[in-house]
Image (spheres, rainbow, N blue to C red):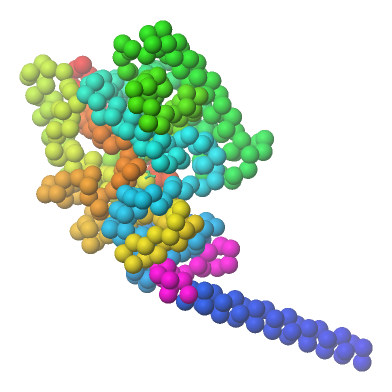
Amino acid sequence: MYYILVKMTWVVGSWVLIGIFVSGFCLYKVMKKNKEEKQRKNGIPRGSSGWPFLGETLDFIACGYSSRPVSFMEKRANLYGKVFRTHILGKAIIVSTDPDVNKVVLQNHGNAFIPHYPKSISELLGKYSILHINGPLQKRLHALIGGFLRSPQFKAEITRNIEKSVQHVFSSWMENQDRRIYIQLESKKIAFEVMVRTLMSIGPGEDLNFLRREFEEYSKGLISLPIKLPGTRLYKSLKAKGRMLKVVRSIIEQRKMAMEENQGKGFSIKDVTDVLLRDTFESSDETQPRLPLDSISENIIEMMIPGEETVPTALTLAVKFLSDSPVVLARLVEENKELTRQKAKSGDEYNWTDYVSLPFTQNVISETLRMANIVNAVWREAVKDVKIKGHLIPKGWCVLASFSSLHMDEENYENPYEFNPCRWKKTGASINSNTFTPFGGGQRLCPGIELSRIEIAIFLHHLVTTYRWVAEDDDITYFPFVRMKRKLPITITPIVGGTMEER
Ligand code: HEM
């Protein structure tokens, strides 16, 4: 009898629990549906918030690891339209795969949006980083850096310096007995050298090696858990940043003393450090916001982030796409050999214009940037309610302007998965295009566009005229950053009489 009672109580209890669970679930579904209905009426785009807490994060990450990361966007754009709502990485966000909406977000007239980064990145960026700041100070910093990187003196100087860095790294390959190198690692060496020269005029040597080691440690924390306790990834990265700051501060101190001696006059600008320092001296226009002096060193280090990870990826993926497309490679070799012949005949040095005047090479660069999707999207947070093309982005929500969706959309590019530099022949790669935005656009358009393109052009010119290579099988992975799974190993054979050998 007692046994039957216990059993019955257990059965009834189980049914009650199941009942509570089912009605709870139904209630949750009804409330969610009502909330979504209300949001839709307000103009918030259609979409799904996915699972409680997790949202649609798992599918987002799974697509990121696949060979077609845009499939996350494609699936939802087909269901809900080019602008849709989702919930990923703990945030309700609106995703735009619409070029017109992306343009409005990037232009940011009315300052409705501020940048949004994961917490670990925000911690490592610091409060004065150009990627973080908004308003007049960001505009000022952007104009200073952009103005310097576009100046004729910088262009002339950096052309020689990039050639030197390429030469320096290429010559080390010949010391390698089996002539097998990892392009992903080698391209990082070149790009880091160029970046540190651009920022602080530091050439190969102790300081460069120190900064390289510490920057590697620093950048490992960009995607990490936002916990700053001793032993955690973020903590180690912040320590590495502290060690880099010491070197940079001492350089700035020396430069500052020299400037003070000259009262900021008659000082030739060599690098970004000089540009920022000089700005703290000039007082002709007091209405312009100025960067506080003590933030310059932090800013210099933080500026390595947008430049350091991106260019090596472009160099690596260019080699990958060319290795897989022998016909394109043959045309590239032909165009670049012709430049070598002309230079040998005239005896002139190479200059910036020589490299940017190679039309097919420029198309190879554009096509690489389109397919590589190195910065696949930008995230912004709305600081007020914004309506774009009838879609409401409510205050406090994030919007993700997807660049890769535009670059891999049939509507914008025929056979988007085919590496076809000839597609750029007619259109060219304009920075005003709404559907080609590897460098972003509007207020925060990358100031490193020309520097990146010349770096890729110089690297490709000397690679294809100095070496032949055979690449091993390797695949691209897209999450959290674009990179090669095996770092793209290639085996090189020097071309007799190649450009680097002659010079
Ligand atoms: C292939 C190489 C590169 C790609 C694909 C790239 C891409 C981008 C993109 C998409 C943005 C916009 C971010 C946003 O809107 O939030 C950006 C910003 C920026 N990039 Fe680049 N970049 C590259 C190389 C460089 C280089 C070499 C430099 C070095 C000077 C650089 C410096 C910057 C800076 C300082 C910003 C921030 C601009 C601002 O917020 O005002 N980038 N980059």
Q: Quadrant of the N terminus?
A: bottom right
Task: Choose between 438 and 459: the one closer to the eye.
Answer: 438
Question: Would residue 52 be counted in the magenta stretch?
Answer: yes
Expressed as whole percent of the image width and height from the top left, the position of residue 327 reads: 17, 45
- Quarter of image, res 144: top left
> Which is more toward the observer, 266 or 409?
266
Q: Residue 126 or 70: which is nearer the viewer?
A: 126
Residue lying at the far right of the rendered structure? 2
Q: Quadrant of ligand 1?
A: top left
Q: Chief secondary structure of the magenta span?
A: loop
> On the image, which quarter does residue 460 sit in?
top left
User: Whole-percent x and y of residue 503?
Assistant: 21, 16
Q: Is residue 457 left or right of residue 82?
A: left
Give the residue at x 33% y 12%: 265
Does the magenta-highlighted stretch encompass residue 392?
Answer: no
Taking the spot 10% from the left edge, 29% from the top edge, the residue there is 338
Q: Which residues are magenta?
A: 38-55
Q: Is residue 317 left or right of residue 362?
A: right
Q: Work out which residue is located at the far top of the displayed protein and give it.
A: 261
- The residue sitting at 50% across, 24% down in the picture is 294
Is 183 situated above or below 109?
Answer: above
Residue 192 placed where, x, y %?
Answer: 39, 28
Q: Position of residue 148 (x, y in %)?
A: 29, 26
